[in-house]
């Protein structure tokens, strides 16, 4: 539920709190550069948390692959709340040429590699450690009215707009649509603080959408997920982003990982964790504020940021073009564990 405007900040359930390798051949191993500006100061504060992450993707092809070209968004970002170390990328079979590294339009790390020799399987493993700072406590009631935030993002000739304006524009998976606007409109009451309304929308999606991995696939967009009333974290994020954009607000898609605790008394299962997705909302007072509609929580020290963009299409962990191969759905195993 959204926080009660009359209750003290400490009672707010959505208080915005800061936020062994396989035997494949090593073809690229990169150490992350120094942390982003301000990261060392934030990470030096008491309460920081350290996690290890291993993300393995394996394809076993129906037929041999004669040629392949792949792009990967698997190297996590350094942020003011997150410092990455020891990142390594392992690819089996080893590409013939060195793995290319660059930054995309949103500042995410992007890697490219190719195979010109025939192969019948592919394994790509990303592993790293990350230290997460304790996010500061933010008061959603102090955020500006949502209409003011939307007005600041509208085009006005001769005035410089915030960089967030590109995340108001529609995208393939999160379009601007009257149906999506109606889904959220009653929560965005006149002069309601932006983050309170965004939290209420997060809670609505969590309550009304059923988590069902079989209901959708990677090509499902926000409108389709809404019609089904079911989906996975990707669909929950696309729905929230599309609804906010349809009201003139900026929201972006964040890919990453989530530490999930095993049942009491049970050991942590290797590969039991999955890649995850959530939403970052632009607030003129606080900047980008991350919300997780799948779990109805603000993003904190259980969430590891990998990349962000307009929607899933910008940050799919691994994509490629192959000759041959047949039908080969990937097998993905993600392990997130405390250090």
Image: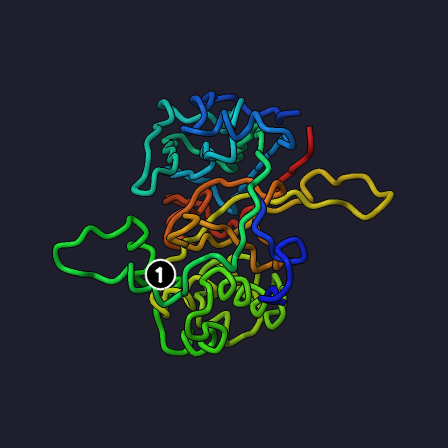
Examine the rendering and report whether any part of residue 126 can be seen: yes
Out of 217 and 275, give the one closest to the viewer: 275
The N terminus - image quarter: bottom right
Image spot of residue 221 (x, y percent): 43, 65
Q: Is residue 103 left or right of residue 121?
A: left
Which residue appears farthest toward the left when viewing the image? 158
Q: Residue 288: percent from the left, percent from the top?
A: 43, 49
Q: Is residue 256 left or right of residue 309?
A: right
Residue assigned mark 1: 149
- Measuring from the top left, give residue 67's x and y in whole percent: 37, 37
Name the residue located 53 percent from the left edge and 32 percent from the top edge: 126
The C terminus appears in which quarter of the rendering? top right
Kindly indicate the quadrant of the structure image that contains residue 214. bottom right
Residue 27 sits above or below residue 204 on the image: above
> Alpha-carbon neighbours of circle 1 within 10 Å: few (<14), some, or many (≥20)?
many
Against 25, is 261 above or below? below
Classify residue 17 as left or right of residue 272. left
**Helix, strand, or loop for circle 1?**
helix
Q: Horizontal and vertical percent for residue 21? A: 62, 25
Residue at horizontal 65%, vertical 38%?
335
Q: Quadrant of residue 159?
A: bottom left
Out of 279 and 24, give the one closest to the viewer: 279
């Amino acid at each position: 539920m959204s926080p009660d405007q009359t209750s003290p900040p400490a009672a707010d359930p959505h208080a915005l709190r800061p936020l062994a390798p396989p035997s494949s051949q090593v073809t690229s191993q990169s150490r992350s550069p120094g942390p982003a500006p301000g990261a060392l100061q934030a990470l030096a504060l008491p309460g920081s948390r350290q996690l290890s992450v291993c993300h393995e993707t394996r394809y076993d092809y129906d037929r041999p692959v004669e040629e392949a070209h792949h792009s990967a968004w698997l190297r996590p970002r350094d942020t003011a709340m997150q410092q990455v170390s020891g990142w390594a990328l392992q690819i089996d079979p080893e590409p013939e040429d060195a793995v290319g590294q660059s930054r995309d339009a949103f500042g995410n790390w992007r890697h490219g590699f190719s195979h010109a020799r025939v192969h019948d399987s592919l394994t790509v493993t990303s592993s790293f450690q990350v230290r997460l700072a304790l996010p500061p406590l933010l008061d959603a009631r102090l955020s500006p009215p949502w209409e003011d935030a939307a007005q600041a993002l509208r085009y006005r000739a001769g005035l410089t707009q915030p960089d967030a304006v590109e995340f108001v524009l529609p995208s393939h998976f999160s379009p601007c649509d009257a149906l999506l606007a109606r889904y959220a409109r009653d929560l965005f009451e006149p002069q309601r603080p932006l983050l309170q309304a965004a939290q209420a929308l997060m809670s609505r999606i969590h309550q009304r959408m059923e988590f069902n991995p079989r209901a959708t696939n990677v090509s499902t967009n926000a409108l389709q997920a809404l019609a089904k009333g079911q989906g996975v974290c990707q669909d929950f994020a696309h729905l929230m982003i599309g609804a906010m954009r349809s009201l003139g607000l900026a929201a972006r898609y964040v890919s990453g990982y989530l530490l999930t605790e095993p049942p009491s008394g049970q050991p942590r299962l290797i590969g039991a964790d999955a890649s995850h997705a959530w939403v970052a909302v632009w607030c003129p007072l606080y900047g980008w504020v991350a919300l997780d509609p799948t779990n109805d929580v603000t993003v904190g020290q259980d969430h590891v940021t990998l990349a962000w963009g307009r929607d899933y299409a910008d940050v799919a962990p691994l994509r490629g073009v192959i000759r041959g191969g047949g039908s080969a759905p990937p097998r993905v195993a993600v392990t997130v564990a405390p250090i």
